[in-house]
Each structure stands twice: as structure tokens, then as C-alpha cells.
Amino acid sequence: MNFIEKLFEGMLWNSRFVILSAVIGSLLAGFAIFYMATVDVVNLFGHALHYADSGMTEEARKALHDSTVSHIVEVVDGYLLATVMLIFSLGLYELFISDIDQAHGSKASSKILVISNLDDLKSRLAKVILMILIVTLFEEALNMKMTTPLDLVYLGASIALIALALYLTHAAEHGTGKEESAGDNPEKHGH
């Protein structure tokens, strides 16, 4: 019976390697989005070169300017989404497979990519997704046509809600940091 139990537990433990499909898939999706956003930047730069053409009318220059700003916002959105996929891929690997030695051992590496638990992964993904939402709101605000006073109220309310979300994210982050530092060294805080 002991042999069957060890065999089953070994199979159960090794089943975690199925997560590699999500790790590789997320990484490939992130690379694809990085590629598309970079191609957009190259194309955008090609269009922006025409901005200094002397034969361009003021209306055409204004349209090119507005189009360029809108496309830059789309590119930022693409890079942020690719970053989400990268963080998700690295986080899944660290949580289910193994720590990434280069991320933990090097002083030059970014600590944002070191994931220690599921809450850590969720927190980092939530921050980047919030940034994507902010960029998307900015993009929509650039293209928004104000036809009624209610449109202005909607825009103001959406900005206020984004500000509230940023405030709550910041407050939660600093509240967690205080609890962790108090728990790390009770003598230092008078406990």
C-alpha cells in the first residue's frame, strides 16, 4: 500500500508541470504583443516623418498630430498588455515549478519580477491592468466628442473613479507594507 501511495503522490506532484503550457503560452502571447506594438511604433515613426512637410496644410498637420497621439496611446497599451503576459508567465513558473535563480541572485535584476506567492502575483497583475485601464480611458477621452454637458460629467466621473482606484491601490500597498514590517521585527516596534 505504501508503494501505491508514493507512486500516486509522485504523479500528483509532477502534474504541476502541466502549468508549463500556460507559462509558454503566456510568454509567446507576450512576445507576439511586444512584436505588434514595436511594428506599430516603426509605422508610427514613418508617418510622423511627414509632419514637417512644407506642403502639408494646417488641418492635415492637426489630423496627423491627433492620430499620432492616439496611436502612441495604443502602443503604450500594447506594451502594458505584453508586460502583463510576461509577469503572468514568470509568476506561474515561480509559483508552481521553481524559483528563477537569476531573478533572486542578481542585484541588477528587477524585484518586480520576483513572485513569492499567489497574492503577490495578483497584486502585480492588478497594478498593470489598472494602468492599462487608465491608458484606455485616456485613449477614449482623446477621441471623445463632447456633445452634451452630461458627456463632460461622465468624463469627470471616470477620471474621479480612476483617481480613487489609484488612491486605494496605493493605500492598500502601504498598509500591507506597515503590517509586514511590524511582523518582521516585533522588538523594533515595541511588541
Image (tube, rainbow, N blue to C red):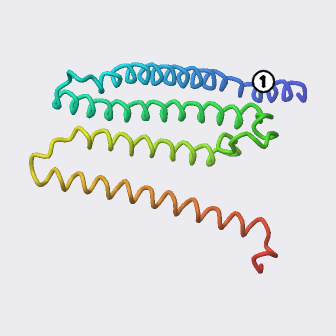
The image quarter in which residue 30 lies: top right
User: Looking at the image, is 41 positioned above or below residue 150?
Assistant: above
Residue at horizontal 64 percent and vertical 62 percent from the top: 177
In the foreground, 162 or 172: 162
Percent across and percent down for residue 136 are: 35, 39
Indicate the amino acid at tag 1: Met
Which quadrant would the C terminus be assigned to in this image?
bottom right
The image shows a total of numbered marks equal to 1
The image quarter in which residue 144 lies: top left
Residue at the farthest bottom position: 190
Residue at the farthest left position: 148
**161 left or right of 33?**
left
Residue at horizontal 29 percent and vertical 26 percent from the top: 51
Percent across and percent down for residue 39 are: 45, 19
In the foreground, 37 or 49: 49
In the foreground, 185 or 81: 81
Percent across and percent down for residue 27 are: 59, 24
The image quarter in which residue 175 lies: bottom right
Residue at horizontal 51 percent and vertical 30 percent from the top: 82
User: Looking at the image, is 83 positioned above or below residue 172?
Assistant: above
Neighbor class of circle 1 (other Cα within 10 Å; few <14, some 14-19, many 20+) is: few
Which quadrant would the N terminus be assigned to in this image?
top right
Percent across and percent down for residue 110 are: 69, 42
Q: Residue under label 1, please give it.
A: 11
Helix, strand or loop for disc 1: helix
**23 left or right of 15?**
left
In the foreground, 54 or 117: 54
